[in-house]
Image (cartoon, helix red, strand yellow):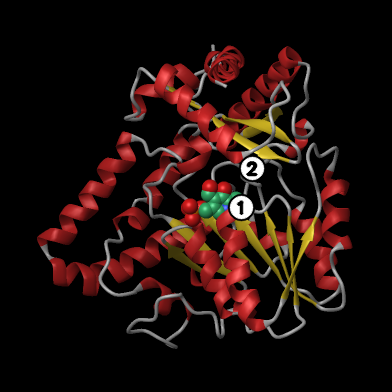
Amino acid sequence: MSRYGAELKELWPLEPDMIFLNHGSYGAAPKQVLSEQANWQRQLESQPCQFINVVAPRAIRDAAGMLANFIGTHGEDTVFVENTTSGLNAVLQSIPFGSGDEIVISDHIYNATRNTVKFVADPAGARIVVADIGLPVADEDQIFNAVMAAVTPATRLILIDHIASITAVVFPVARIAAAARQRGIPVLVDGAHAPGMLDLDVCSLGVDWYVGNCHKWLCAPKGSAFLWADAARQNGLHPTVISHDMNKGFTFEFDKIGTRDASAWLSVPAAISLHEDLGGTHLRKYCHNVAVAEGRALAKRWGTQTGASDDLFGTMATVRMPGSLPPDRAISERLKTWLWVEKRAEIHIMPFAGAFWVRLSVAPYTTPEECRAVGPLIEAALEALATEA
Ligand SMILES: Cc1ncc(COP(=O)(O)O)c(C=O)c1O
């Protein structure tokens, strides 16, 4: 029997009487990591001035160095941000787009990220070009070809996911970055899901900026994410909130923005240690294996298909739902509400590419049995909706 799944549940403060299959949305922090965060908060409140002025700046750099080690970057090029949304905003709002410039994104992009791109593109008169990848994804060529087909001589930026939220598909980031580099186009990666899900080595990807969450698959406290920028891209890169250390250098400017509680960032090393203690690569492999095996079993039960081949999934897998309901967000919200209220089950469902897709999220504490409950639960939800209608 695996030492993952049920045996690890007690490490998390998650309610025992629910089926929690949506680690992907916001992550979940283990008790040990939360207690480390509480220690930092106690230190802060016991000596507010010393802590904020002297202790925190050093501790933040130490924590950034440990994170850098884990994600394959260097501490001096890595800063903490509150979440992926704020890191992506910082990069996008720092690029001087002009009229006629094109920004390539894909149809798998996260909604908040799409909004941010629109927020910077519209006033500049820049054009957003959407690479149409679709779902299911047969192989990485489908992603690569769609993204590169969207590139023109006017492309000023390619913004891609490392792992897409709606579809759970892992993008061939290094391959896209190599092709972009040949054309002189910078690449920004939304890696919200990557730390703790993939064997991440950011510097080897050949991209220009990389943003990722620590609170999802690394299980750090909420409010911990990072922005890495290639040394050549740091000049002119500013946080969205300007504070004391404006223009003093990349790490200074991001490390201290007004008065804030850095305890989530300072607990990232504890989250990394726990992740490694639980097996690191081995743990990620367990989660991947359960996600793809249970995803395939669910597709078989429903006579449908998974969103991609096994090698294009990390620790999440998408499966097309049965039935012919119109793929409308209001319906997926009703199904999710019914699952929570009637069954205390947290299951992610999204409409995409003309169908509804269920996303299985497999975290260290997730059991295959919980994944197997998804089939009957979704079928019951669909039946309840049909009766209501
Ligand atoms: C692909 C992707 N990008 C960005 C985000 C935004 O992350 P956050 O809410 O931490 O800013 C998410 C969150 O789920 C995501 O999945």
Rendered residue at 83%/45% (across/down): 140
- Judged left or right of residue 147, residue 226 is left
In the picture as drawn, the residue positioned furthest to the left comes out as 46
Residue 58 visible in the displayed image: yes
- Relative depth, front residue between 42 and 353: 353
Whether the residue under disc 1 has CB within 8 Å of ligand 1: yes
Q: Is residue 81 left or right of residue 74?
A: left
Reply above or below: 16 against 35.
above
Question: Which residue of the protein is positioned furthest toward the front in this rendering?
Answer: 389
Q: State the residue at coordinates (12%, 65%).
A: 47
Q: Seen from this angle, which residue lies furthest bottom? A: 247
Residue under circle 2?
166
Q: Position of residue 189 (x, y in %)?
A: 65, 61
Question: Residue, x 65% and y 82% (percent of image)?
Answer: 124
Residue type marked 1: Tyr
Residue closer to the observer: 145 or 215: 145
List the residue tagged with mark 1: 110
Judge left or right: residue 194 versus residue 181. Answer: left
Where does the C terminus fall, quadrant-wise?
top right
Q: In the rendered image of this protein, does residue 318 appear above or below residue 39? A: above
Q: Between residue 132 and residue 365, name the one nearer to us.
A: 132
Separation of residues labelled 2 and 1 (CA atoms): 7 Å
Circle 2 — which element?
loop
Residue 107 pos. (x, y %):
73, 52
Amino acid at pointer 2: Ile
Marks 2,1: beta carbons within 8 A:
yes
